[in-house]
Image (spheres, rainbow, N blue to C red):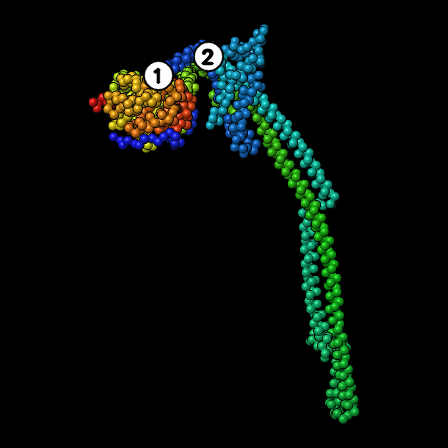
Amino acid sequence: MSTVTPPRPSSSVPPIARPPAAMPQGAGSSAPTIDPIRLLKKYKWVIAAAVIVGVMVGVGGYLVLRTVMPRYESFAIFRVQGQPVDPFKPPTIREDELERYMLTQAQLMVSDTVLDRVAQMPNHAAVAPTWAPLIPREKGGVTDVKNTMIYLQENVKARIIPGTEFIRLSARAPKAGAAKEIVQLVRQTYSGYISEQNLAERRRQIATLQARYNENETLITTLKGRRDGELTRSGIDSIDNRLNEARNAIAGVNQQINQVRLDLEGVKTTLERYELNARKPGGPTYDDSLRATVEAGPIISNYKMRISALETELRKCEAEGMGPGHTEYRRIVTELNVVRDQMNTRRDDELRQAFFGQLQNARNAIEQLQRQEADLSKRKNELAEGLNRVLAIQIRIGDIDRQIQGLEQTNQTLRVELDHLRAIIERFLRERGLPGGKDLFEDRVALVQSENVPDTMAFPRLTMLLPLGVVLVCGLVGSLIVVREIVDQRVKGPGDVAILPRTRVLGMIPIADNDPAGRTAVETAFRDRPTGMVAEHFRQVRAPLIKRMEQAGHKTLVVAAGMPDSGATSTVLNLAFASAAAGQRVLVIDANMRRPALHRLLERSESPGLADVLAGQMTFEQAVQTTGVSNLSLLSAGTKEQRIYERLGTEDMGRVLANAKAHYDLVLVDVPPMVVSGDALSVATRADASMLVVRALSEKRGLVARLRTSLGDSHSEFLGILVNGVRPAAGGYLRKNIRVTHEYQANSN
């Protein structure tokens, strides 16, 4: 047994603020939560009925639509080639060219141009006998083109088959044959339209290419005339011969210039040597060639002949015996010496004159060679100018020739293209006139599968309408269920309380009618059937509740109900029974002076009680009654005449609770419902802790939140909310848990 705590201090002391209740996990949003499993269990028969109704709706819709608006679908498939057929067109480099072309052709198949031609056909009865009776008609039996167009726009479709090169052209109609005929007419009209457009385009291409060809031929003739005129004006018969002659002449002049320059360099060298020899201090030195030239001259030769004659005479005198002393001999010797001196003098003069003659000749040769070089350079420039004129003419002629050559090559290509286009047109016209001829002008769009008469309806289909009916009905029913759960603000289980902000869920007590152990009074369920489902749930609530109170040092607990019949009295009694069974000394106080019930349930007298103690007519110890249950005592409501509600909020009530805390381990106070009176708040202000009991499917979340806030604002610590009378359908797995608990209890006995 717990030690009795000292009495509570006087109420004149300012109350100590209680810590707020801890906010449970996930209790921060006021938005309702939907448990799909719980809803399925709760509304499983409704959902099963919805499935059956959905099947019936699907079958019924199928039968009705099959009768009133059947639709058959026929289709044709085209294949689009990835490259142009025309080999003379440069291939495209756009990666999306094929997709763009396929989209263009698909749109063209169902374009107003094609469908309008189909609608305006004058012979529908002949080409489409099944569809013709279904075509809208005006007065007089004339086809209503506007409505026919609308019908075709709604029922003829063309789409690209994803991931392929195929286009699917389809049509729907009430009759199978009509669907096939519509596809055939649209296909043929599309093919004819494409053929006409392509044929016209080919002819425009031929006209354009022919105009370009003629323009090029005219330009070629003009260029040839310019070339001939250029040759005539320049007086040149052959550009190549004139170029060769000019180049050869320039080469010859260059060779002469080089030779003159070599000679000039040699003469300059000789002149420098002569000038150096002439400037010698002792006079110039004459070379052997110059001496030989002077010796061979007539003057020196004459002197040599005279000397030779005198020497002959001298030898003759010697032969005659004339000696040096002879007068004749001396005369000859004297004359011989004079002639020799004259010859030497003359030789020197001749050598000097010949040397300076060579020097002057060298100078004259240099001047002559320089004049010759200048003449040759002038000649070379004249020849170069002539060569440049010929080259300029050659360049102009070459440009003209290249232009002519380019135009001739272009015209050759144009001739090939023209022949190719004409051949295509001729082949198309020839093949189109044959039975079973080509449908399209070119092979880039080819028919790979023709339309046929469908053997089954495209709409309606049972495989589509049956699940659709089930989905629609179940979706509607499911939406109504969800809306009902969202709109329904009533507390149906702990989950609806847990979503309230700053709210702790203490637990739940299932409705006693579902207790497998048997039905009993819920107020005394723990005492009368301790192994029952209700008793077990009160044990589960008591354990954390008492633990929380012991941790906070609380002993007095106000159990308040939200509305009448919420089960506050049942909660007080069953928690008291459970705590007393655990060995705690428990006192229950009936502070519900408006409708007291604890004395009746415990089979005790109504007075004396709380009202008498508050009135001062007797002491607390005198008013407390034993209950026949071990460790459990009762302080009933008291005498009716003394039940003054205002006394519940006085200091006397505080002293009663303090006295109870001094003698008991746990004091449970039953108070009137909070929506009926403010007694619960008055008592909660004097107690240690409080809790709120709400009944499932009775209180609404808004009311519970308001009451929880009111209790939380009082002096006592608000411990949480207990949900009472929870039905298995609202608890999700509650029914299974109850069954498992009962079986476990039964097997243990």
Residue at left offset 42%, top offset 22%: 702
The answer to whether the residue labelled 1 contacts the one labelled 2, judged by CB atoms less than 8 Å apart, is no
Judging by the rendered image, the residue that carries numbered circle 2 is 70
Q: Where's residue 460, x and y in %?
A: 44, 14
Name the residue type under label 2.
Pro
| In front of the other: 455 or 27 | 27
Foreground pick, 20 / 264: 20
Residue drawn at (75%, 76%), measured in percent from left and top? Answer: 352
From the image, tell me which residue sits under label 1: 641
Give whichever of discs 1 and 2 has the lower sequence position: 2
Marks 1, 2: nearer the viewer: 1
Could you say where residue 299 lies in the image, as x and y percent from the top left?
77, 77
User: Looking at the picture, how far across and down is residue 232, in whole percent?
Assistant: 73, 43
Q: CA distance from mark 1 to mark 2?
A: 85 Å
Badge 2: few (under 14), some or many (20 or more) residues near its Cα, within 10 Å? many
Q: Is residue 371 above or below residue 666?
A: below
Disc 1 marks a residue whose amino acid type is Glu
| Image quarter (top left, top right, bottom left or bottom right) of the C terminus | top left
Q: Nearer the viewer, residue 471 or 629?
A: 629
In the image: residue 745, left or right of residue 242: left
Establish if 120 lies above or below 558: above
